[in-house]
């Protein structure tokens, strides 16, 4: 067969494959960013086994894995509901709508300015604060207590939340994009006392969350007004507002890359090239098994006539013709599964009497895989002559 099937893809098939490649690639990158790559690896392995089961007609394995995928889909929706919400938000923002992209860039720049100015003021006034800016990883599972807010990010709002007279000023404020999602949150405390040295609880909470997620944790010390940044299990002090601005801007650029069209097209071609090739390969395999191999084709076979022994003491005088042409149709994969004994034509002579007989052929006389159906038989009848002993005398 070679690669002749590639010529059968056509324009619609190419579009179909490209769309599914983009979808598979997005899922792969999403799993990678949410640090759930092991889940994706397991799903891919099970999918390959399922495709093999479909290809070689293993009904029990295919049925069990089909049920497994139905269950795992529900489990993914439940377990990763926060990540899925974030994923679809990003799809909306980074769609082909330039207006949405410009709005996202403007909101990003505004958020940086608000955070830098607010933290600088806190440092001058020695107001303790802990601000968490969400990255790509989910953080809700790591938060305790907290009050939902979902308000627009602004200096007055942050300063009111961290006012020493506020009931929730000791907790952390969580920022998601340009929204203040929660306040008065309790974070997991780090046990890395070597990095914390003589730092307080806010620093331990910032370092603790940074050890579990990619969030940016900003801390202002109430005692000496120092501003510190914690990320990826590391904490460092930032002394100049300009350096703080650069750090926060760099974080936002990483989480929400720049929208320059020329750069985005370059990145689209070069970035994550291995994942793109893998996604294309998986999609091509899916198309081959589920589309190409499932297409119904028609074939004609010339099959020799086989027969059972007639009732004793009859003997076979002649069978005409000795070969029958049968036209069948079915999915391509069904023809690959035919054994050496297939196709087969068998007529039963046990119930026939001596003399010249006509045997009408039907589908029951042929042996084909169950997915293959018989369209035409030529000829439909066989002439069979059975001789009795001493018939010639």
Image (cartoon, helix red, strand yellow):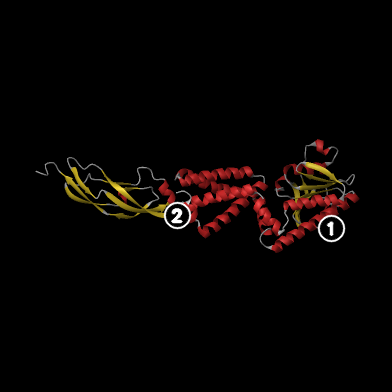
Q: Nearer the viewer, residue 30 or 15?
A: 15
Q: Nearer the viewer, residue 138 or 159?
A: 138
Is 372 displayed left or right of 181 in the figure?
left
Is 229 displayed left or right of 324 in the figure?
right
Tell me the tag on residue 156: 1
Check the image and name the residue furthest to the left.
Answer: 393
Q: Secondary structure at mark 2?
A: loop
Q: Which residue is mark 2?
A: 295
Across and down, in percent, residue 1 comes to: 44, 49
Q: Nearer the viewer, residue 348 or 224?
A: 348
Q: Secondary structure at mark 1?
A: helix
Is 163 displayed left or right of 85 in the figure?
right
Across and down, in percent, residue 282 comes to: 56, 48
Which quadrant would residue 178 be assigned to in this image? bottom right
Residue 361 visible in this rendered orientation of the protein: yes
Report the residue at 68% width, 55% height from top: 266
Neighbor class of circle 2 (other Cα within 10 Å; few <14, some 14-19, many 20+) is few
- Give the total number of marks visible in the rendering: 2
Check the image and name the residue furthest to the top.
Answer: 194
Alpha-carbon span between mark 2 and mark 1: 64 Å
Across and down, in percent, residue 166 comes to: 84, 52
Across and down, in percent, residue 204 comes to: 80, 41
First-in-chain label (2 vs 1): 1
Which quadrant would residue 40 be assigned to in this image? top right
Residue 74 visible in this rendered orientation of the protein: no
Is 267 displayed left or right of 383 in the figure?
right
Q: Quadrant of the C terminus?
A: top left
């Amino acid at each position: 067969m070679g690669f002749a099937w590639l010529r059968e893809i056509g324009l619609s098939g190419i579009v179909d494959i490209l769309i599914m490649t983009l979808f598979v690639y997005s899922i792969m990158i999403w799993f990678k960013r949410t640090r759930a790559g092991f889940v994706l690896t397991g799903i891919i392995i099970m999918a390959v086994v399922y495709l093999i089961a479909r290809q070689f007609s293993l009904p029990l394995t295919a049925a069990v894995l089909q049920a497994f995928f139905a269950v795992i889909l529900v489990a993914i929706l439940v377990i990763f509901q926060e990540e899925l919400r974030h994923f679809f938000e990003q799809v909306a923002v980074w769609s082909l709508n330039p207006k949405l992209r410009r709005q996202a860039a403007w909101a990003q720049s505004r958020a940086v300015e608000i955070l830098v100015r607010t933290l600088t003021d806190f440092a001058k006034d020695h107001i303790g604060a802990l601000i968490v800016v969400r990255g790509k990883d989910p953080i809700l599972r790591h938060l305790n207590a907290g009050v939902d807010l979902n308000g627009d990010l602004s200096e007055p709002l942050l300063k009111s939340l961290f006012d020493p007279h506020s009931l929730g000023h000791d907790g952390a404020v969580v920022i998601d994009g340009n929204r203040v999602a929660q306040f008065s949150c309790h974070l997991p405390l780090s046990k890395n006392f070597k990095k914390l040295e003589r730092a307080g609880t806010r620093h331990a909470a910032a370092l603790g969350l940074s050890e579990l997620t990619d969030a940016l944790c900003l801390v202002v010390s109430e005692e000496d007004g120092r501003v510190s940044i914690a990320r990826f299990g590391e904490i460092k002090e930032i002394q100049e507002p300009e350096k703080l601005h650069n750090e926060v801007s760099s974080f936002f650029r990483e989480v929400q890359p720049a929208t320059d069209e020329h750069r985005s097209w370059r990145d689209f071609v070069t970035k994550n090239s291995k994942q793109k090739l893998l996604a294309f390969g998986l999609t091509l395999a899916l198309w081959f098994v589920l589309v190409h191999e499932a297409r119904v084709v028609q074939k004609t076979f010339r099959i020799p006539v086989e027969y059972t022994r007639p009732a004793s003491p009859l003997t076979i005088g002649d069978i005409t013709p000795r070969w029958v042409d049968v036209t069948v149709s079915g999915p391509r994969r069904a023809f690959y599964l035919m054994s050496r004994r297939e196709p087969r034509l068998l007529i039963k002579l046990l119930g026939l009497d001596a003399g010249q007989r006509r045997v009408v052929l039907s589908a029951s006389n042929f042996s084909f895989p169950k997915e293959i159906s018989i369209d035409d038989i030529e000829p439909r009848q066989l002439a069979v002559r059975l001789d009795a002993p001493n018939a010639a005398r």
